[in-house]
Image (tube, helix red, strand yellow):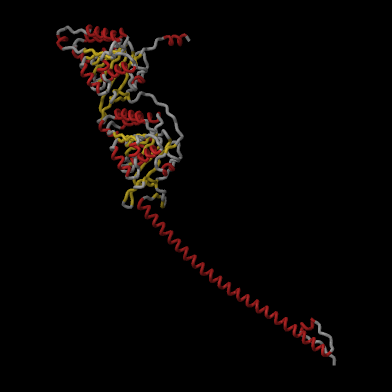
Amino acid sequence: MARKNQKEREPRLAKAQTGIDGVDEITGGGLPRGRTTLLAGPAGSGKTVLALQTLVNGARRFDEPGIFVAFEEGFQQVAANAASFGWEIPSLVQKRGRRSPRLAFVDGRLSPGAVQAGTFDLSGLLAAVEFRAKEIGAKRIVFDGIDVLLVMLNDPRVERGEMCRIHDLLERAGVAGVVTMSTAGLEPPGSFMLSLSDCIIQLTHRLAERASIRGFRVVKYRGSAFIANEFPFAIASQGIEVADFGTRPKYRVFTERVSSGIPRLDHMLAGGYFRGSTVLVTGMPGTAKTTLAGAFVAAACARGERALYISLDEQPAEILRNLASVSIRLERYVRSRLLEIYADHPQETSPEEQFVRMRQRIRAHRPSTLVIDPISAAIRMGGQSTVLGVAERLLAMAKSEGITTLWTSLYQGSEEAMEATPLHVSTVADTWIHLSYRAGRGERNRSLTVIKSRGTGHSHQVRELILDDRGVDLADVYTVGGEALMGTARWEGERAEVATQRDVEAEEARKRRELEILAAEIRAQTEGLERRRESLAAEMRLLDQSITLRERNESRRQQEVRARRGGEPASRAGRRKGRSAPTED
């Protein structure tokens, strides 16, 4: 318990926020106050930009005045270079009424003659800096280009003495001090400065497969926790932005579905894509990857949602024209500003700078749907690992904002090796749709299959993708002998099936006619026999009537005979047997 209370009583290291995306997260809150931070790196790595941006952000965002001591460039050069970032350095240097300027510039450049004459001493310069710091209430001081000073000196003892003077000034003033030094690495000259500094940030600038790659790494930070990995950064239109600050954003998981823009594809996906998910469409050139992307953004805009289409291959006018040929018309959505189509070619910049620009576009347009077409184009500049890192950070940002993202990727390998795609899509995509060609009967036909869709009981069928001036559709599956037929092969198969069906129907009709004739014959025979039966029955009735009449007549005659002779009438039984009554002689 005592140890815990002791830790609670320990003062926390005071820090000055830089206001630069990523830097404050990596350093655990910013740069140390009352201590020295060394920015080391080769020429062109962004040391001066980072140091000056720290001063500008301090003055504008945190109300902390600063001093910039230049050993290499004059004020006019520094201000002109910073103008491209929109920092307006002259307005910060100017005094406004009774208010002190927010930024002061001190020219620390020394003439070679002063050093050679043995009159070299920083005490006067540092005294002027300290006085100026008190005058404007400076909280941050930058010494830019200390390596220029070290090169002019040829005495290690003098070098160490002057470095200690600077370090003591920063500690005594309690300001956040930044010293920039150009080095090929963390090697002498300047090794004493490495030991003297409390915080060391190393900036790198290298080429990776013809692309410019910049790196940011905290080498040491006394009294503070920090992230020691190297992170890529870019020098963008508003200054330095570290592309990744080492945290994994949390994001909401949606169960809502959004349409792909193709009803039958929605049916294959049990209702469409999950909102906020990542969709990858791969395929060879010409397999309609861009068409699927266009259908997706068209469906989003039709719902009244904002969409951003980032093209790394074609110009916006080309995309609009080509999609219109398959009845996907996006011009009205561009005019209404629901849709923004932005072209950014990888050959013009580094992958990290592309990421920064994409992030700026996303923040400005605030889309619910994002398309990147094709992400594989960026691999040509910067290499696979760099582009994959950019893609993962971009997708993490999209997920954190609930943006449904569809990106296309060119794939030219065999389908047996699809898991080894250039971007390792199995680890970053929620839904993976693959487009390919089926060659046969002298033609190529497009096919579509859903390789995976997390959380969805999707169809595993291979469907024919049909493009025409009426739009985009998927044909019903047609198989013969276990093989799905498409295009001409399907047409021929369907014709053969129709012909076979017609033959079957004709044979059935012929058989039916034969049976109908036989049934008619049987009915005719039956009717003849029925008429014969009726004729015989009539004859039998006539015979019975004749017999009855004859018997009656015979009975009447016998009665008459007996009556004339006075005899008894004959019995009925006798008459039936044909016997006559006996007579008396």
Residue 53 locus on image (x, y percent): 29, 19
Q: Quadrant of residue 498?
A: bottom left
Res. 260 visible in picture: yes
Left or right: 26 with respect to 504? left
In this view, the residue farthest toward the bottom is: 585
Res. 424 visible in picture: no
Residue 30 locus on image (x, y percent): 34, 17
Would you place residue 336 above or below residue 120 in this image? Answer: below
Would you place residue 208 above or below residue 488 in this image? Answer: above
Left or right: 584 with respect to 537? right
Nearer the observer, 574 or 137: 137
* Numbered-mark total: 0
Residue 467 locus on image (x, y percent): 35, 46
Q: Quadrant of residue 334?
A: top left
Left or right: 50 with respect to 508? left
Instruction: Tell me the quarter of the image containing the C terminus.
Output: bottom right
Q: Quadrant of residue 410?
A: top left
